[in-house]
Image (cartoon, rainbow, N blue to C red):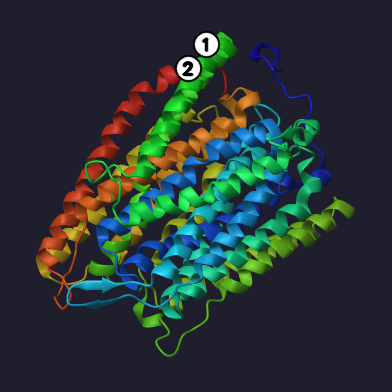
Amino acid sequence: MAATDLPHHNVNEVPRDPRDELFGHPKGVYVCFFTEMWERFSFYGMKALLLLYLLQHHRFGDGPGLDVLGAYGGLVYCLPVVGGLLADRYLGMRKAVVFGGLLLVAGHLGMAVEGHAATASGGTVVRDEGALRVFYLSLALIIVGVGFLKPNISTIVGRLYPENDPRRDSGFSLFYAGINLGALFSALVCGYLGQTLGWKWGFGAAGIGMLLGLAQFLWGQKYLHGHAEPPDPARLRERVFGLPREWAIYLGAFLALVPLAALMWAVANGRFALGGEISLALILMLLVMLAVLAWFAWFLKARCTREQRHRMLALMALIFMALVYFTLYEQTYGSWVTFTDRLLTKDVFPSLVIREGTPWPWSTVSLVLAPMAFVAAATLSDRRPDSSMPKLLFAGAIVLMLVFLLRDCVVLPQTAGSLTYLGALFLVLLAPVFARLWDGLDRRGLDPSKPAKSALGLLFAGLSFVPMAWAAQHAGETGQLASVWWLVLAYLVLEIGEMCLAPVGLAAVTQLSVRSVMSLMMGTWFLATAFSETLAALFGKLAAIDVPEGTALDFAAAGDKYANLFWLMTGIGIGWAVLAFVAAPLLRRLMHGIK
Protein backbone atom coordinates (compact mmCIF):
# COMPACT_ATOMS: atom_id res chain seq x y z
CA MET A 1 0.00 0.00 0.00
CA ALA A 2 1.39 3.39 -0.93
CA ALA A 3 1.82 5.90 1.86
CA THR A 4 -0.73 8.26 0.33
CA ASP A 5 -3.34 5.46 0.42
CA LEU A 6 -3.05 5.07 4.20
CA PRO A 7 -6.10 6.33 6.10
CA HIS A 8 -5.44 8.86 8.84
CA HIS A 9 -7.82 6.93 11.11
CA ASN A 10 -8.05 3.17 11.13
CA VAL A 11 -11.54 2.21 10.02
CA ASN A 12 -11.19 -1.21 11.62
CA GLU A 13 -10.67 0.10 15.14
CA VAL A 14 -13.31 -1.07 17.56
CA PRO A 15 -15.59 1.54 19.18
CA ARG A 16 -15.58 1.68 22.95
CA ASP A 17 -17.84 -0.93 24.52
CA PRO A 18 -18.13 -1.30 28.31
CA ARG A 19 -18.20 -5.09 27.90
CA ASP A 20 -14.82 -4.95 26.20
CA GLU A 21 -13.14 -2.92 28.94
CA LEU A 22 -11.73 -3.52 32.40
CA PHE A 23 -10.55 -0.62 34.57
CA GLY A 24 -11.05 1.72 31.60
CA HIS A 25 -8.83 -0.16 29.14
CA PRO A 26 -9.58 -2.79 26.47
CA LYS A 27 -9.46 -6.34 27.78
CA GLY A 28 -7.09 -7.17 24.94
CA VAL A 29 -4.48 -5.02 26.67
CA TYR A 30 -4.61 -7.36 29.66
CA VAL A 31 -4.30 -10.40 27.38
CA CYS A 32 -1.09 -8.86 26.03
CA PHE A 33 -0.15 -7.80 29.57
CA PHE A 34 -0.15 -11.37 30.90
CA THR A 35 1.31 -12.93 27.75
CA GLU A 36 4.20 -10.50 27.91
CA MET A 37 4.44 -11.02 31.68
CA TRP A 38 5.13 -14.71 31.14
CA GLU A 39 7.50 -14.08 28.24
CA ARG A 40 9.49 -11.58 30.31
CA PHE A 41 9.38 -13.97 33.27
CA SER A 42 11.12 -16.59 31.16
CA PHE A 43 13.51 -14.14 29.49
CA TYR A 44 14.62 -12.18 32.56
CA GLY A 45 14.59 -15.30 34.70
CA MET A 46 17.32 -16.68 32.50
CA LYS A 47 19.07 -13.34 32.11
CA ALA A 48 19.30 -12.83 35.88
CA LEU A 49 21.25 -16.08 36.07
CA LEU A 50 23.16 -16.05 32.78
CA LEU A 51 26.31 -14.12 33.72
CA LEU A 52 26.56 -15.70 37.18
CA TYR A 53 25.98 -19.16 35.64
CA LEU A 54 28.86 -18.64 33.22
CA LEU A 55 31.18 -17.24 35.90
CA GLN A 56 30.38 -19.65 38.72
CA HIS A 57 29.29 -22.92 37.04
CA HIS A 58 31.36 -22.96 33.84
CA ARG A 59 34.10 -20.71 35.28
CA PHE A 60 34.35 -18.22 32.45
CA GLY A 61 36.22 -14.98 33.12
CA ASP A 62 34.44 -11.63 33.38
CA GLY A 63 35.41 -10.68 29.81
CA PRO A 64 34.09 -13.78 27.99
CA GLY A 65 31.03 -13.88 30.26
CA LEU A 66 30.14 -10.28 29.44
CA ASP A 67 30.79 -10.99 25.74
CA VAL A 68 28.24 -13.82 25.79
CA LEU A 69 25.76 -11.68 27.72
CA GLY A 70 26.15 -8.79 25.28
CA ALA A 71 25.97 -10.94 22.13
CA TYR A 72 22.96 -12.87 23.41
CA GLY A 73 21.13 -9.74 24.52
CA GLY A 74 22.02 -7.95 21.31
CA LEU A 75 20.82 -10.73 19.02
CA VAL A 76 17.64 -11.19 21.08
CA TYR A 77 16.71 -7.59 20.31
CA CYS A 78 18.17 -7.56 16.79
CA LEU A 79 16.02 -10.29 15.25
CA PRO A 80 12.67 -8.60 16.06
CA VAL A 81 13.37 -6.49 12.96
CA VAL A 82 13.03 -9.67 10.89
CA GLY A 83 10.15 -11.03 12.98
CA GLY A 84 8.26 -7.75 12.68
CA LEU A 85 8.74 -7.70 8.90
CA LEU A 86 7.51 -11.29 8.48
CA ALA A 87 4.49 -10.59 10.67
CA ASP A 88 3.63 -7.38 8.77
CA ARG A 89 3.79 -9.03 5.37
CA TYR A 90 2.85 -12.65 5.84
CA LEU A 91 2.28 -14.35 9.18
CA GLY A 92 0.24 -11.84 11.10
CA MET A 93 0.93 -11.30 14.76
CA ARG A 94 -0.93 -14.31 16.18
CA LYS A 95 1.04 -16.91 14.21
CA ALA A 96 4.32 -15.08 14.85
CA VAL A 97 3.68 -14.93 18.60
CA VAL A 98 2.68 -18.61 18.87
CA PHE A 99 5.67 -19.82 16.83
CA GLY A 100 8.06 -17.61 18.77
CA GLY A 101 6.59 -18.81 22.05
CA LEU A 102 7.12 -22.47 21.16
CA LEU A 103 10.77 -21.79 20.32
CA LEU A 104 11.17 -19.96 23.63
CA VAL A 105 9.75 -22.89 25.59
CA ALA A 106 12.22 -25.26 23.92
CA GLY A 107 15.13 -22.89 24.50
CA HIS A 108 14.47 -22.29 28.17
CA LEU A 109 13.97 -25.98 28.89
CA GLY A 110 17.27 -26.68 27.09
CA MET A 111 18.94 -24.26 29.49
CA ALA A 112 18.02 -26.63 32.31
CA VAL A 113 20.69 -29.07 31.01
CA GLU A 114 23.50 -27.67 33.15
CA GLY A 115 25.97 -30.59 33.05
CA HIS A 116 28.72 -30.89 35.62
CA ALA A 117 30.46 -27.87 37.10
CA ALA A 118 33.81 -26.82 35.63
CA THR A 119 36.96 -27.69 37.52
CA ALA A 120 40.36 -25.98 37.62
CA SER A 121 43.62 -27.85 37.81
CA GLY A 122 47.07 -26.33 37.36
CA GLY A 123 45.60 -23.16 35.89
CA THR A 124 43.56 -25.10 33.29
CA VAL A 125 39.75 -25.01 33.39
CA VAL A 126 37.96 -28.21 32.35
CA ARG A 127 34.35 -27.61 31.26
CA ASP A 128 31.45 -29.88 30.28
CA GLU A 129 31.57 -29.25 26.51
CA GLY A 130 28.45 -31.34 25.84
CA ALA A 131 26.36 -29.23 28.21
CA LEU A 132 27.83 -26.08 26.68
CA ARG A 133 26.76 -27.20 23.17
CA VAL A 134 23.20 -27.58 24.45
CA PHE A 135 23.60 -24.16 26.08
CA TYR A 136 24.58 -22.48 22.79
CA LEU A 137 21.70 -24.15 20.92
CA SER A 138 19.29 -23.09 23.68
CA LEU A 139 20.46 -19.49 23.36
CA ALA A 140 19.82 -19.71 19.60
CA LEU A 141 16.28 -20.99 20.19
CA ILE A 142 15.56 -18.12 22.57
CA ILE A 143 17.05 -15.55 20.20
CA VAL A 144 14.87 -16.67 17.27
CA GLY A 145 11.81 -17.10 19.49
CA VAL A 146 12.01 -13.57 20.87
CA GLY A 147 12.51 -12.30 17.32
CA PHE A 148 9.09 -13.61 16.35
CA LEU A 149 7.25 -12.78 19.58
CA LYS A 150 8.60 -9.51 20.93
CA PRO A 151 7.69 -6.82 18.34
CA ASN A 152 4.23 -8.19 17.66
CA ILE A 153 2.83 -8.20 21.19
CA SER A 154 3.68 -4.51 21.57
CA THR A 155 2.11 -3.68 18.20
CA ILE A 156 -1.15 -5.37 19.14
CA VAL A 157 -1.46 -3.10 22.19
CA GLY A 158 -1.18 0.01 20.01
CA ARG A 159 -3.89 -1.22 17.64
CA LEU A 160 -6.40 -1.69 20.43
CA TYR A 161 -6.70 2.09 20.87
CA PRO A 162 -8.15 4.66 18.41
CA GLU A 163 -5.66 7.18 17.05
CA ASN A 164 -4.89 10.02 19.50
CA ASP A 165 -6.76 8.19 22.27
CA PRO A 166 -5.51 9.88 25.48
CA ARG A 167 -5.55 6.47 27.19
CA ARG A 168 -2.78 5.16 24.92
CA ASP A 169 0.20 6.32 27.03
CA SER A 170 -1.38 5.09 30.25
CA GLY A 171 -2.30 1.83 28.48
CA PHE A 172 1.31 1.32 27.49
CA SER A 173 2.32 2.13 31.05
CA LEU A 174 0.04 -0.68 32.24
CA PHE A 175 1.43 -2.99 29.56
CA TYR A 176 4.92 -2.03 30.67
CA ALA A 177 3.91 -2.97 34.20
CA GLY A 178 3.10 -6.45 32.86
CA ILE A 179 6.56 -6.67 31.34
CA ASN A 180 8.15 -5.76 34.63
CA LEU A 181 5.81 -7.85 36.76
CA GLY A 182 7.24 -10.80 34.84
CA ALA A 183 10.76 -9.51 35.41
CA LEU A 184 10.02 -9.08 39.12
CA PHE A 185 8.70 -12.61 39.50
CA SER A 186 11.59 -13.98 37.46
CA ALA A 187 14.28 -12.63 39.78
CA LEU A 188 12.49 -13.79 42.92
CA VAL A 189 11.65 -17.23 41.50
CA CYS A 190 14.21 -18.12 38.81
CA GLY A 191 17.08 -16.05 40.24
CA TYR A 192 16.50 -17.37 43.75
CA LEU A 193 15.92 -21.03 42.80
CA GLY A 194 18.87 -21.05 40.41
CA GLN A 195 21.38 -19.93 43.03
CA THR A 196 19.94 -21.92 45.95
CA LEU A 197 18.53 -25.22 44.62
CA GLY A 198 20.56 -25.42 41.40
CA TRP A 199 20.80 -23.72 38.01
CA LYS A 200 18.42 -26.18 36.33
CA TRP A 201 15.64 -25.20 38.74
CA GLY A 202 15.87 -21.56 37.73
CA PHE A 203 16.15 -22.21 34.00
CA GLY A 204 13.41 -24.88 34.08
CA ALA A 205 10.99 -22.54 35.84
CA ALA A 206 11.56 -20.00 33.06
CA GLY A 207 10.49 -22.55 30.42
CA ILE A 208 7.32 -23.49 32.29
CA GLY A 209 6.45 -19.81 32.56
CA MET A 210 6.62 -19.32 28.81
CA LEU A 211 4.38 -22.33 28.21
CA LEU A 212 1.72 -20.80 30.45
CA GLY A 213 2.11 -17.50 28.60
CA LEU A 214 1.26 -19.19 25.30
CA ALA A 215 -1.88 -20.67 26.80
CA GLN A 216 -2.89 -17.20 28.04
CA PHE A 217 -2.45 -15.66 24.58
CA LEU A 218 -4.42 -18.35 22.74
CA TRP A 219 -7.29 -18.12 25.24
CA GLY A 220 -7.59 -14.34 24.82
CA GLN A 221 -7.85 -14.15 21.01
CA LYS A 222 -11.47 -13.00 21.10
CA TYR A 223 -10.43 -9.79 22.88
CA LEU A 224 -7.94 -8.86 20.13
CA HIS A 225 -10.73 -8.33 17.52
CA GLY A 226 -8.77 -9.80 14.62
CA HIS A 227 -5.87 -7.34 14.89
CA ALA A 228 -3.43 -10.26 15.19
CA GLU A 229 -4.52 -12.18 12.08
CA PRO A 230 -2.49 -12.54 8.83
CA PRO A 231 -2.93 -9.56 6.47
CA ASP A 232 -3.45 -11.84 3.44
CA PRO A 233 -3.97 -15.55 4.27
CA ALA A 234 -3.73 -16.50 0.59
CA ARG A 235 -0.08 -15.40 0.46
CA LEU A 236 0.76 -17.88 3.21
CA ARG A 237 -0.44 -20.71 0.97
CA GLU A 238 1.70 -19.68 -2.01
CA ARG A 239 4.54 -22.10 -2.81
CA VAL A 240 8.12 -21.03 -1.99
CA PHE A 241 10.94 -23.54 -2.61
CA GLY A 242 8.28 -26.22 -2.97
CA LEU A 243 6.64 -25.45 0.39
CA PRO A 244 3.71 -23.24 1.42
CA ARG A 245 5.15 -19.85 2.32
CA GLU A 246 4.16 -20.22 5.98
CA TRP A 247 6.07 -23.49 6.38
CA ALA A 248 9.02 -22.08 4.41
CA ILE A 249 9.25 -19.29 7.00
CA TYR A 250 9.21 -21.80 9.86
CA LEU A 251 11.84 -23.97 8.13
CA GLY A 252 14.06 -20.92 7.55
CA ALA A 253 13.84 -20.12 11.27
CA PHE A 254 14.93 -23.65 12.19
CA LEU A 255 17.82 -23.55 9.72
CA ALA A 256 19.01 -20.30 11.32
CA LEU A 257 19.49 -22.07 14.66
CA VAL A 258 22.73 -23.80 13.66
CA PRO A 259 24.69 -20.69 12.59
CA LEU A 260 23.35 -18.76 15.59
CA ALA A 261 24.47 -21.51 17.98
CA ALA A 262 27.88 -21.52 16.27
CA LEU A 263 28.00 -17.75 16.60
CA MET A 264 27.41 -17.96 20.37
CA TRP A 265 30.19 -20.58 20.62
CA ALA A 266 32.56 -18.27 18.74
CA VAL A 267 31.75 -15.35 21.04
CA ALA A 268 32.22 -17.44 24.20
CA ASN A 269 35.59 -18.69 22.98
CA GLY A 270 36.85 -15.39 21.54
CA ARG A 271 37.02 -16.72 17.98
CA PHE A 272 36.95 -14.54 14.84
CA ALA A 273 36.79 -11.27 16.83
CA LEU A 274 38.18 -8.23 15.03
CA GLY A 275 40.70 -6.41 17.20
CA GLY A 276 39.72 -8.68 20.08
CA GLU A 277 36.50 -6.68 20.70
CA ILE A 278 34.36 -6.65 17.52
CA SER A 279 32.65 -10.05 17.65
CA LEU A 280 30.79 -11.79 14.85
CA ALA A 281 27.56 -11.01 16.69
CA LEU A 282 28.30 -7.28 16.63
CA ILE A 283 29.22 -7.49 12.93
CA LEU A 284 25.87 -9.16 12.22
CA MET A 285 24.03 -6.42 14.11
CA LEU A 286 25.94 -3.75 12.21
CA LEU A 287 24.89 -5.32 8.92
CA VAL A 288 21.25 -5.44 10.04
CA MET A 289 21.46 -1.81 11.16
CA LEU A 290 22.92 -0.70 7.81
CA ALA A 291 20.19 -2.59 5.96
CA VAL A 292 17.50 -0.97 8.12
CA LEU A 293 18.95 2.51 7.65
CA ALA A 294 19.15 2.00 3.88
CA TRP A 295 15.53 0.84 3.79
CA PHE A 296 14.51 3.75 6.04
CA ALA A 297 16.12 6.32 3.72
CA TRP A 298 14.41 4.75 0.69
CA PHE A 299 11.04 4.55 2.45
CA LEU A 300 11.14 8.20 3.54
CA LYS A 301 11.87 9.31 -0.01
CA ALA A 302 9.64 6.97 -1.99
CA ARG A 303 6.65 6.15 0.18
CA CYS A 304 6.05 8.99 2.64
CA THR A 305 4.25 12.29 2.47
CA ARG A 306 5.99 15.31 3.98
CA GLU A 307 4.09 14.93 7.26
CA GLN A 308 4.78 11.20 7.47
CA ARG A 309 8.46 11.82 6.71
CA HIS A 310 8.72 14.29 9.58
CA ARG A 311 7.00 11.92 11.99
CA MET A 312 9.26 9.02 11.03
CA LEU A 313 12.36 11.19 11.55
CA ALA A 314 11.10 12.22 14.98
CA LEU A 315 10.52 8.53 15.76
CA MET A 316 14.09 7.68 14.77
CA ALA A 317 15.36 10.36 17.16
CA LEU A 318 13.31 8.82 19.99
CA ILE A 319 14.67 5.39 19.10
CA PHE A 320 18.23 6.74 19.35
CA MET A 321 17.45 8.14 22.81
CA ALA A 322 16.25 4.66 23.79
CA LEU A 323 19.55 3.22 22.56
CA VAL A 324 21.49 5.54 24.88
CA TYR A 325 19.16 4.89 27.83
CA PHE A 326 19.32 1.10 27.56
CA THR A 327 23.11 1.16 27.16
CA LEU A 328 23.07 2.56 30.70
CA TYR A 329 20.22 0.35 31.90
CA GLU A 330 21.79 -2.93 30.78
CA GLN A 331 24.62 -2.42 33.25
CA THR A 332 22.09 -3.80 35.76
CA TYR A 333 22.59 -7.31 34.32
CA GLY A 334 26.35 -6.87 33.83
CA SER A 335 28.55 -4.66 35.99
CA TRP A 336 25.82 -4.09 38.60
CA VAL A 337 25.42 -7.87 39.10
CA THR A 338 29.15 -8.56 39.48
CA PHE A 339 29.56 -5.47 41.69
CA THR A 340 26.68 -6.63 43.92
CA ASP A 341 28.12 -10.14 44.08
CA ARG A 342 31.56 -8.90 45.14
CA LEU A 343 31.23 -5.60 46.99
CA LEU A 344 27.71 -5.24 48.42
CA THR A 345 25.72 -6.77 51.24
CA LYS A 346 22.69 -8.68 49.93
CA ASP A 347 19.76 -8.59 52.36
CA VAL A 348 17.65 -5.43 52.52
CA PHE A 349 16.22 -6.31 55.97
CA PRO A 350 18.75 -8.80 57.44
CA SER A 351 16.91 -9.32 60.73
CA LEU A 352 13.79 -10.58 58.93
CA VAL A 353 15.50 -13.07 56.61
CA ILE A 354 14.80 -16.79 57.11
CA ARG A 355 18.22 -18.35 57.70
CA GLU A 356 17.26 -22.00 58.27
CA GLY A 357 16.73 -24.40 55.39
CA THR A 358 15.72 -23.29 51.90
CA PRO A 359 12.47 -21.29 52.12
CA TRP A 360 10.21 -21.57 49.07
CA PRO A 361 9.19 -18.38 47.20
CA TRP A 362 5.45 -17.74 47.57
CA SER A 363 5.55 -15.84 44.27
CA THR A 364 5.25 -19.16 42.46
CA VAL A 365 1.59 -19.12 43.57
CA SER A 366 1.13 -15.58 42.28
CA LEU A 367 2.30 -16.56 38.82
CA VAL A 368 -0.73 -18.80 38.41
CA LEU A 369 -3.11 -16.68 40.47
CA ALA A 370 -2.81 -13.51 38.41
CA PRO A 371 -3.72 -14.89 34.95
CA MET A 372 -6.47 -17.08 36.41
CA ALA A 373 -7.98 -14.06 38.15
CA PHE A 374 -8.00 -12.15 34.86
CA VAL A 375 -9.66 -15.04 33.01
CA ALA A 376 -12.37 -15.21 35.69
CA ALA A 377 -12.83 -11.42 35.81
CA ALA A 378 -13.01 -11.09 32.01
CA THR A 379 -15.52 -13.93 31.73
CA LEU A 380 -17.74 -12.44 34.44
CA SER A 381 -17.50 -9.02 32.82
CA ASP A 382 -18.60 -10.45 29.47
CA ARG A 383 -21.76 -11.79 31.08
CA ARG A 384 -22.45 -8.90 33.49
CA PRO A 385 -20.70 -5.74 32.28
CA ASP A 386 -22.31 -3.57 34.97
CA SER A 387 -21.24 -5.78 37.87
CA SER A 388 -18.46 -4.64 40.18
CA MET A 389 -17.50 -8.24 40.98
CA PRO A 390 -14.99 -8.65 38.08
CA LYS A 391 -13.07 -5.57 39.19
CA LEU A 392 -13.12 -6.66 42.84
CA LEU A 393 -11.94 -10.16 41.93
CA PHE A 394 -9.11 -8.89 39.75
CA ALA A 395 -8.05 -6.20 42.22
CA GLY A 396 -8.15 -8.70 45.09
CA ALA A 397 -5.84 -11.06 43.23
CA ILE A 398 -3.41 -8.22 42.51
CA VAL A 399 -3.35 -7.25 46.20
CA LEU A 400 -2.69 -10.86 47.22
CA MET A 401 0.12 -11.07 44.66
CA LEU A 402 1.73 -7.96 46.11
CA VAL A 403 1.55 -9.47 49.61
CA PHE A 404 3.34 -12.60 48.38
CA LEU A 405 5.91 -10.46 46.59
CA LEU A 406 6.55 -8.36 49.68
CA ARG A 407 7.04 -11.49 51.74
CA ASP A 408 9.59 -12.89 49.28
CA CYS A 409 11.45 -9.60 49.02
CA VAL A 410 11.80 -9.39 52.79
CA VAL A 411 12.34 -12.94 54.10
CA LEU A 412 14.15 -14.78 51.28
CA PRO A 413 17.97 -14.74 51.47
CA GLN A 414 18.93 -12.58 48.49
CA THR A 415 21.69 -13.14 45.95
CA ALA A 416 23.23 -10.93 43.27
CA GLY A 417 20.90 -12.56 40.75
CA SER A 418 17.70 -12.31 42.77
CA LEU A 419 18.35 -8.65 43.65
CA THR A 420 17.69 -7.74 40.03
CA TYR A 421 14.06 -7.83 41.17
CA LEU A 422 14.57 -4.27 42.47
CA GLY A 423 14.31 -2.74 39.01
CA ALA A 424 11.08 -4.50 38.19
CA LEU A 425 9.67 -3.85 41.68
CA PHE A 426 10.07 -0.11 41.29
CA LEU A 427 8.62 -0.19 37.79
CA VAL A 428 5.53 -2.07 38.95
CA LEU A 429 5.07 0.38 41.83
CA LEU A 430 5.73 3.42 39.63
CA ALA A 431 3.53 2.35 36.68
CA PRO A 432 0.17 3.37 38.22
CA VAL A 433 1.76 6.58 39.54
CA PHE A 434 2.98 7.56 36.09
CA ALA A 435 -0.24 6.46 34.39
CA ARG A 436 -2.15 8.88 36.64
CA LEU A 437 0.54 11.53 36.32
CA TRP A 438 0.43 11.64 32.50
CA ASP A 439 -3.40 11.58 32.48
CA GLY A 440 -3.60 14.35 35.07
CA LEU A 441 -1.07 16.55 33.28
CA ASP A 442 -2.85 15.95 29.98
CA ARG A 443 -6.17 17.17 31.42
CA ARG A 444 -4.44 20.37 32.54
CA GLY A 445 -2.62 20.85 29.25
CA LEU A 446 0.75 20.35 30.97
CA ASP A 447 1.72 16.91 29.68
CA PRO A 448 5.37 17.03 28.46
CA SER A 449 6.00 16.01 24.88
CA LYS A 450 7.39 12.55 24.17
CA PRO A 451 10.84 14.00 23.33
CA ALA A 452 10.89 15.88 26.65
CA LYS A 453 9.89 12.74 28.55
CA SER A 454 12.68 10.82 26.82
CA ALA A 455 15.19 13.52 27.78
CA LEU A 456 14.06 13.19 31.40
CA GLY A 457 14.62 9.45 31.14
CA LEU A 458 18.23 9.98 30.06
CA LEU A 459 18.83 12.43 32.90
CA PHE A 460 17.59 10.03 35.57
CA ALA A 461 19.55 7.16 34.00
CA GLY A 462 22.77 9.14 34.36
CA LEU A 463 21.97 10.14 37.94
CA SER A 464 21.28 6.52 38.93
CA PHE A 465 24.99 5.72 38.69
CA VAL A 466 25.93 8.30 41.34
CA PRO A 467 24.98 6.12 44.36
CA MET A 468 26.69 3.13 42.70
CA ALA A 469 29.91 5.16 42.32
CA TRP A 470 29.71 6.26 45.97
CA ALA A 471 29.20 2.63 47.05
CA ALA A 472 32.21 1.50 45.00
CA GLN A 473 34.39 4.21 46.50
CA HIS A 474 33.25 3.29 50.03
CA ALA A 475 34.01 -0.41 49.52
CA GLY A 476 37.39 0.35 48.01
CA GLU A 477 38.39 2.73 50.81
CA THR A 478 37.17 0.62 53.75
CA GLY A 479 37.82 -2.89 52.43
CA GLN A 480 34.32 -3.85 53.58
CA LEU A 481 31.07 -4.61 51.76
CA ALA A 482 29.02 -1.49 51.05
CA SER A 483 25.33 -1.41 51.98
CA VAL A 484 22.78 -2.88 49.58
CA TRP A 485 20.70 0.27 50.12
CA TRP A 486 22.99 2.07 47.65
CA LEU A 487 21.74 -0.40 45.06
CA VAL A 488 18.13 0.19 46.12
CA LEU A 489 18.51 3.94 45.65
CA ALA A 490 20.24 3.48 42.27
CA TYR A 491 17.41 1.27 41.00
CA LEU A 492 14.76 3.76 42.15
CA VAL A 493 16.35 6.63 40.22
CA LEU A 494 16.99 4.45 37.16
CA GLU A 495 13.40 3.21 37.01
CA ILE A 496 11.95 6.73 37.32
CA GLY A 497 13.92 7.38 34.15
CA GLU A 498 12.60 4.25 32.48
CA MET A 499 9.00 5.18 33.22
CA CYS A 500 9.65 8.54 31.56
CA LEU A 501 11.20 7.07 28.43
CA ALA A 502 10.25 3.48 27.63
CA PRO A 503 6.42 3.28 27.76
CA VAL A 504 5.94 6.55 25.88
CA GLY A 505 8.60 5.46 23.38
CA LEU A 506 6.69 2.26 22.67
CA ALA A 507 3.51 4.30 22.28
CA ALA A 508 5.32 6.66 19.88
CA VAL A 509 6.22 3.74 17.61
CA THR A 510 2.54 2.89 17.18
CA GLN A 511 1.58 6.57 16.68
CA LEU A 512 4.38 7.97 14.50
CA SER A 513 5.00 4.95 12.25
CA VAL A 514 3.39 4.69 8.85
CA ARG A 515 0.84 1.99 9.55
CA SER A 516 2.01 -0.46 6.85
CA VAL A 517 5.45 -0.73 8.52
CA MET A 518 4.46 -0.45 12.17
CA SER A 519 5.76 -3.88 13.22
CA LEU A 520 8.99 -3.25 11.32
CA MET A 521 9.47 0.03 13.18
CA MET A 522 8.75 -1.76 16.45
CA GLY A 523 11.52 -4.15 15.43
CA THR A 524 13.77 -1.13 14.82
CA TRP A 525 13.04 0.02 18.38
CA PHE A 526 14.31 -3.34 19.59
CA LEU A 527 17.29 -3.12 17.23
CA ALA A 528 18.34 -0.04 19.20
CA THR A 529 18.04 -2.15 22.34
CA ALA A 530 20.22 -4.78 20.64
CA PHE A 531 23.05 -2.30 20.22
CA SER A 532 22.58 -1.10 23.77
CA GLU A 533 23.10 -4.67 25.04
CA THR A 534 26.37 -5.01 23.14
CA LEU A 535 27.58 -1.52 24.03
CA ALA A 536 26.73 -2.17 27.69
CA ALA A 537 28.87 -5.31 27.63
CA LEU A 538 31.79 -3.39 26.10
CA PHE A 539 31.50 -0.71 28.79
CA GLY A 540 31.11 -3.36 31.49
CA LYS A 541 34.43 -4.91 30.48
CA LEU A 542 36.13 -1.71 31.65
CA ALA A 543 35.49 -3.03 35.16
CA ALA A 544 36.25 -6.69 34.39
CA ILE A 545 38.08 -8.38 37.26
CA ASP A 546 39.75 -11.76 37.20
CA VAL A 547 40.57 -13.19 40.62
CA PRO A 548 43.24 -15.91 40.31
CA GLU A 549 42.44 -19.26 41.89
CA GLY A 550 43.24 -19.27 45.61
CA THR A 551 43.57 -15.48 45.97
CA ALA A 552 41.23 -12.95 47.61
CA LEU A 553 39.57 -10.02 45.88
CA ASP A 554 41.53 -6.75 46.12
CA PHE A 555 38.82 -4.41 47.41
CA ALA A 556 40.78 -1.22 46.68
CA ALA A 557 41.51 -2.11 43.05
CA ALA A 558 37.99 -3.46 42.46
CA GLY A 559 36.32 -0.44 44.05
CA ASP A 560 38.42 1.91 41.92
CA LYS A 561 37.57 0.06 38.70
CA TYR A 562 33.84 0.03 39.38
CA ALA A 563 33.79 3.68 40.52
CA ASN A 564 35.52 4.81 37.30
CA LEU A 565 32.98 2.92 35.19
CA PHE A 566 30.01 4.28 37.13
CA TRP A 567 31.20 7.90 36.90
CA LEU A 568 31.70 7.43 33.15
CA MET A 569 28.10 6.19 32.84
CA THR A 570 26.92 9.21 34.84
CA GLY A 571 28.59 11.60 32.39
CA ILE A 572 27.18 9.79 29.35
CA GLY A 573 23.62 9.91 30.70
CA ILE A 574 23.65 13.58 31.73
CA GLY A 575 25.45 14.69 28.56
CA TRP A 576 22.98 13.08 26.20
CA ALA A 577 20.08 14.32 28.34
CA VAL A 578 21.19 17.92 27.80
CA LEU A 579 21.34 17.39 24.03
CA ALA A 580 17.91 15.73 24.08
CA PHE A 581 16.33 18.67 25.97
CA VAL A 582 17.77 21.08 23.38
CA ALA A 583 16.35 19.00 20.50
CA ALA A 584 12.91 18.40 22.11
CA PRO A 585 11.08 21.49 20.67
CA LEU A 586 12.18 20.65 17.11
CA LEU A 587 11.16 17.01 17.47
CA ARG A 588 7.77 18.04 18.83
CA ARG A 589 7.16 20.17 15.70
CA LEU A 590 8.14 17.23 13.49
CA MET A 591 5.43 15.11 15.17
CA HIS A 592 2.69 17.33 13.63
CA GLY A 593 0.18 17.23 16.46
CA ILE A 594 0.78 13.69 17.70
CA LYS A 595 0.73 13.87 21.49
Give the number of the disc on residue 96.
Answer: none
Q: Where is residue 388 drawn, in percent x and y? A: 80, 57
Q: Is residue 224 visible?
A: yes
Q: Is residue 340 left or right of residue 10?
A: left
> Picture quarter containing residue 402?
bottom right
Q: Judge by depth and name the residue closer to the eye, 437 or 313.
A: 313
Return the residue found at the far right: 383
Q: Judge by depth and name the residue closer to the eye, 375 or 273.
A: 273
How far apart are the alpha carbons under marks 2 and 1? 6 Å
Q: Is residue 421 visible?
A: no
Placement of the C terminus among the 4 image quadrants:
top right
Q: Secondary structure at mark 1?
A: helix
Q: Secondary structure at mark 2?
A: helix
Give the number of the disc on residue 301.
Answer: 1
Residue at (47%, 48%) from the top-left corner?
Answer: 259
- Disc 1 crowd, CA 10 A, few/some/many (<14, 14-19, 20+): few
Residue at (21%, 71%) from the top-left corner?
Answer: 481
CB contact under 8 Å: marks 2 and 1: yes
- Disc 2 crowd, CA 10 A, few/some/many (<14, 14-19, 20+): few
Q: Where is residue 502 drawn, in percent x and y? A: 48, 41
Three-letter code for the amino acid on which mark 1 is drawn: Lys
Three-letter code for the amino acid on which mark 2 is drawn: Ala
Residue at (51%, 75%) from the top-left corner?
Answer: 201
Placement of the N terminus among the 4 image quadrants:
top right
Q: Is residue 165 left or right of residue 319?
A: right
Q: Judge by depth and name the residue closer to the eye, 36 or 355.
A: 36
Q: Is residue 465 left or right of residue 493?
A: left
Q: Where is residue 399 drawn, in percent x and y? A: 62, 65
> Picture quarter containing residue 560?
bottom left
Return the residue found at the far bottom: 356
Give the number of the disc on residue 297.
Answer: 2
Residue at (16%, 65%) from the top-left corner?
Answer: 475
